[in-house]
Amino acid sequence: MSDASAQERDNMFHKSALYQEFLAERAEILRHKWIESEKVGHDIGFEKALLDWIVKHRAAWRALRQNKPSGGDNEHGGHNGFAAA
């Protein structure tokens, strides 16, 4: 496989809707990790932040993203947009 075709394949992958959703969700998890770590005064770790975010925020975050018009990420639609359970 040539470098040009490999680069084209990588570009298509990075532009895919699935990959963009993954990046947006990862950004929300990292934001949640930072906020929760600040609350307790130490790093809670990615796994704990991931599980906590999934339980408390994922469903509402996904619903909000499905209902918003396409054309950019929602900067503040994640952690700060929902009350903790």
Image (cartoon, rainbow, N blue to C red):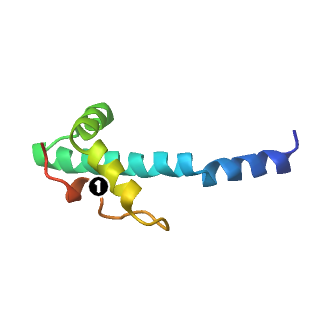
Give the residue at x 33% y 51%.
63
Give the residue at x 32% y 36%.
46
The mark total stands at 1
> x, y percentage for residue 80?
21, 58
Mark 1 surroundings: few (<14), some (14-19) or many (≥20) residues within 10 A = many
The amino acid type, in three-letter code, at marker 1 is Gly
Which picture quadrant has residue 67?
A: bottom left
> x, y percentage for residue 43?
23, 40
Give the residue at x 29% y 55%.
78
Q: Give 24 or 38, whichever is nearer the viewer.
A: 24
Which picture quadrant has residue 56?
A: top left
> x, y percentage for residue 77?
30, 60
Q: Which residue is tagged 1?
A: 78
58 on left or right of 7: left
24 on left or right of 30: right
**Residue lying at the far right of the rendered structure:** 2
58 on left or right of 38: right
- Please identify the quadrant where the C terminus is shown: top left
- Please identify the quadrant where the N terminus is shown: top right
Q: Give 24 or 41, whichever is nearer the viewer.
A: 24
**Residue lying at the far front of the rendered structure:** 67
> x, y percentage for residue 62?
35, 49
Mark 1 residue element: loop
Give the residue at x 32% y 56%.
64
